């Protein structure tokens, strides 16, 4: 810890009034010491992490943090605010702000120490001492785990005398013996010590994660009145630096207060060590507190389970423990003895409604479908490029294939692509059901999707089949099942019953109406012409550029690919695909052009991102514009949408067609009316570029903004305390 924070990285009179200004002020101290190489690039990474989930915690704490390629070594800066700064915590502003900066390739030993600090932030004595620290040196000593009254650099270890509490428990041990940190922080960072153990270094290997509890000898005892209630938990967050370990500490503290044994597996940046199977087997309940998927979730099957977000464990651990004890008392277990519910089905944070869950379920299906679309569509397009559009009438390559004939290779590519395309609807339906009900939803989902193809219900039928399959499995999972039958539920009973129910509904009840609706939509698209086609192109262009690869973008893309995912797509469907791909290329290409023609309006990090955006945009990767949108959403996103709408409308108006669902400018030879298509793309890029330059030019540089190069002032830099835009 001593090399991570110094007095120069402490501001006990932080004057910032927003979280952006606070991050800038603390990051400026890091940059002054050479630990951050690009201030604006690092702040953009901090803002992107903040956009994923607010970093404010109850108790007046803010912990903005991120991994960044602009950080040279793990660094911690601390600020104390008299008025408090809003970091999104439910109980109000934060007065203790910790900015944690980790390099993209930080080693486990350093991250273990940072995780130890994160856990100690749940210690009221530690935060009280920080609030009363009289100078930067005293604050540094507390954070390092030193005795503020002792000599500089003298660390107090976990083996201090009775009554001496180490403010950062385990950090000295972690620094001294980094080899033990590879166990994932379960022992080395104190993940199990809070349950009553006194292990010095934590677990020694991946199977001894529970030894720190001092109760390994009785881990196999059956549940009963002779021992406390036992809970195993898994915590994880997107970056795995702070919330993962704070949630673990909060659960362990709440468990001690309630007389419950809690053993936590932290799936964080400091590593991942599996809990001992004997500890899991002896547990009476499970808590998943996570914002990324739990690894190897099957290990916890068949136990009372609470599945929630990581911040819920930080803010209300006692409620979660009470909830899992209640489920155990009522005999409720994970779905029918299988793995607990999928993350998209869990309750999550308060306020998450059915609409949000529905969007997650649909995006689950679309995200798994897109690779099949790209592979199959490009293979089909290559087949057409080599063998012409009559290649779809070629005989099977099983019956006729000549190694020296180009037409045979074209037929081979076309037929492989057709097989890949045939999976689109089943994969869509199967993974929608998976998003709702986890693996038990896969079988009925794939069956329902295949039936949708059989009855010509197409893309709409796949959506319906996926939602129905997930709902049927979730209904079955809520039925109380005798213990003796739980083992066969996920592999026999659920697939059998759910497939039969979904098949009946798709074949007999709703299949024909959906097929009729699919035909009506196809006919409507085929009849599109003139102003209607142009308006549709503009709308799809707006959607493609609204969130740059997010849900709205994916909806437009899925709509387009569904139209060409047939053996003989209509002319209108191919026009829609062309308009969607052209509009998706506009934002990154426009940002690249803007950074070239008016570089002084962009900081050094954005100019570097602009170089990469040329390739990303040309490859139809809309996400290439995300760094620009994250740093300045109110200017970049509207400008991108305007250019995307122009390109989409012109592409439809020019009648450009495309059989390939991906590829960007590299599939231009496969496009109908390629020259006019490129004109449409160039027009949208010019519109977005001009708007971005105008909007950024209207923004006044803050006084004292640093020069980024000869004659290039950086208008995005600002004096400490000014608000900077972050990702919406």
Image (cartoon, rainbow, N blue to C red):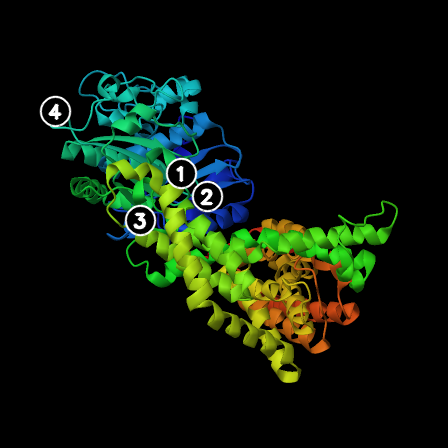
Between label 4 and label 2, give the one nearer the viewer: 4
Dots 2, 1 in contact, CB < 8 A? yes
Q: Quadrant of residue 198?
A: top left
Cα gap from disc 4 to disc 1, whole angstroms? 47 Å
Q: Is residue 224 visible?
A: yes
Question: Cβ–Cβ below 8 Å for labels 3 and 1?
Answer: no
Instruction: Tell me if mark 3 has few (under 14), some (14-19) or many (20+) residues whose alpha carbon lies within 10 angstroms of its own.
Output: many
Question: How many angstroms separate mark 2 from mark 1 (CA)?
Answer: 8 Å
Instruction: State which quadrant residue 175 falls in.
Output: top left
Per the image, label 4 sits on a secondary structure element best described as: loop
**What residue is pinned by disc 2?**
27
Q: Quadrant of the C terminus?
A: bottom left
The residue at which mark 1 appears reads as 77
Q: Position of residue 296 (x, y in %)?
A: 41, 35
Q: Earlier in the sequence, mark 3 or mark 2?
A: 2
Q: CA distance from mark 4 to mark 2?
A: 53 Å
Which residue is label 4 attached to? 226
Q: Element type at marker 2? A: helix
Q: Nearer the viewer, mark 4 or mark 1?
A: 4
Residue furthest to the left: 225
């Amino acid at each position: 810890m001593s090399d991570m924070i110094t007095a120069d990285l402490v501001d006990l009179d932080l004057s910032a009034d927003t979280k952006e200004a606070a991050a800038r002020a603390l990051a400026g101290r890091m940059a002054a010491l050479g630990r951050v190489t690009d201030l604006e690039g690092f702040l953009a990474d901090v803002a992107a992490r903040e956009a994923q989930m607010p970093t404010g915690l109850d108790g007046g704490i803010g912990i903005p943090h991120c991994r960044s390629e602009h950080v040279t070594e793990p660094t911690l800066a601390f600020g104390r605010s008299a008025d408090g700064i809003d970091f999104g915590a439910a109980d109000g502003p934060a007065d203790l702000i910790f900015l944690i900066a980790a390099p993209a390739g930080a080693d486990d030993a350093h991250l273990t120490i940072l995780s130890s600090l994160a856990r100690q932030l749940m210690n009221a004595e530690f935060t009280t001492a920080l609030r009363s620290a009289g100078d930067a040196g005293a604050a540094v000593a507390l954070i390092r785990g030193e005795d503020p009254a002792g000599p500089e650099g003298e660390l107090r270890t976990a083996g201090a005398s009775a009554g001496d509490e180490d403010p950062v428990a385990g950090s000295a041990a972690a620094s001294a013996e980094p080899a033990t940190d590879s166990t994932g922080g379960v022992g080395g960072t104190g993940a199990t010590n809070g349950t009553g153990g006194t292990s010095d270094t934590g677990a020694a290997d991946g199977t001894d994660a529970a030894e720190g509890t001092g109760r390994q000898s009785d881990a196999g005892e059956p549940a009963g009145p002779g021992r406390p209630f036992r809970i195993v938990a898994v915590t994880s967050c997107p970056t795995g630096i702070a919330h993962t370990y704070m949630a673990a500490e909060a659960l362990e503290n709440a468990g001690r207060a309630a007389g419950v044994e809690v053993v936590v597996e932290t799936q964080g940046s400091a590593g991942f060590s599996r809990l001992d199977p004997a500890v899991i087997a002896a547990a009476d309940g499970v808590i998943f507190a996570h914002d990324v998927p739990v690894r190897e979730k099957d290990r916890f099957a068949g136990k009372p389970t609470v599945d929630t977000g990581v911040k819920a464990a930080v803010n209300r651990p006692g409620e979660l423990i009470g909830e899992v004890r209640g489920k155990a008392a009522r005999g409720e277990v994970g779905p029918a003895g299988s793995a607990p519910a999928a993350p998209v089905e869990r309750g999550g944070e308060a306020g998450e409604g059915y609409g949000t869950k529905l969007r997650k379920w649909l995006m689950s299906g679309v995200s798994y479908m897109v690779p099949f679309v790209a592979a199959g569509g490009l293979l089909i397009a290559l087949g057409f490029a080599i063998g012409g559009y009559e290649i779809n009438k070629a005989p099977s390559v099983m019956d006729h294939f000549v190694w020296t004939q180009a037409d045979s290779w074209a037929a081979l590519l076309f037929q492989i692509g057709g097989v890949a395309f045939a999976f689109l609807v089943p994969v869509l339906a199967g993974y929608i059901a998976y998003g709702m009900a986890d693996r038990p939803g896969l079988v009925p989902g794939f069956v329902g999707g295949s039936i949708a193809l059989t009855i010509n219900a197409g893309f709409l039928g796949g959506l319906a089949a996926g939602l129905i399959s997930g709902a049927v499995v979730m209904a079955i999972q809520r039925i109380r099942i005798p213990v003796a039958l739980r083992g066969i539920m996920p592999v026999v009973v659920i697939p059998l019953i759910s497939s039969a129910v979904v098949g009946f509904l798709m074949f007999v009840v709703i299949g024909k109406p959906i097929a009729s609706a699919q035909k009506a939509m196809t006919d409507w698209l085929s009849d599109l012409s003139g102003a209607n086609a142009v308006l549709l192109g503009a709308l799809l262009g707006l959607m493609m550029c609204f969130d740059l690869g997010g849900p709205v973008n994916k909806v437009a893309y899925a709509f387009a690919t569904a139209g060409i995912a047939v053996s003989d797509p209509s002319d209108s469907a191919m026009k829609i695909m062309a308009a969607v791909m052209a509009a998706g290329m506009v934002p990154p290409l426009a940002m690249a052009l803007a950074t070239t023609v008016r570089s002084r309006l962009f900081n050094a990090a954005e100019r570097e991102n602009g170089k990469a955006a040329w390739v990303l945009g040309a490859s139809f990767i809309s996400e290439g514009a995300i760094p620009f949108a994250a740093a300045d959403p109110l200017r970049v996103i509207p400008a991108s949408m305007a250019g995307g709408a122009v390109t989409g409308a012109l592409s439809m108006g020019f009648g450009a067609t495309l059989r390939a669902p991906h590829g960007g400018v590299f599939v231009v030879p496969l496009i109908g009316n390629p020259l006019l298509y490129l004109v449409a793309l160039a027009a949208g890029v010019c519109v977005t570029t001009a708007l971005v330059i105008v909007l950024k030019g209207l923004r006044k540089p803050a006084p004292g903004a640093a020069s980024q190069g000869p004659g290039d002032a950086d208008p995005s830099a600002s004096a400490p305390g000014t608000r900077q835009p972050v990702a919406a």
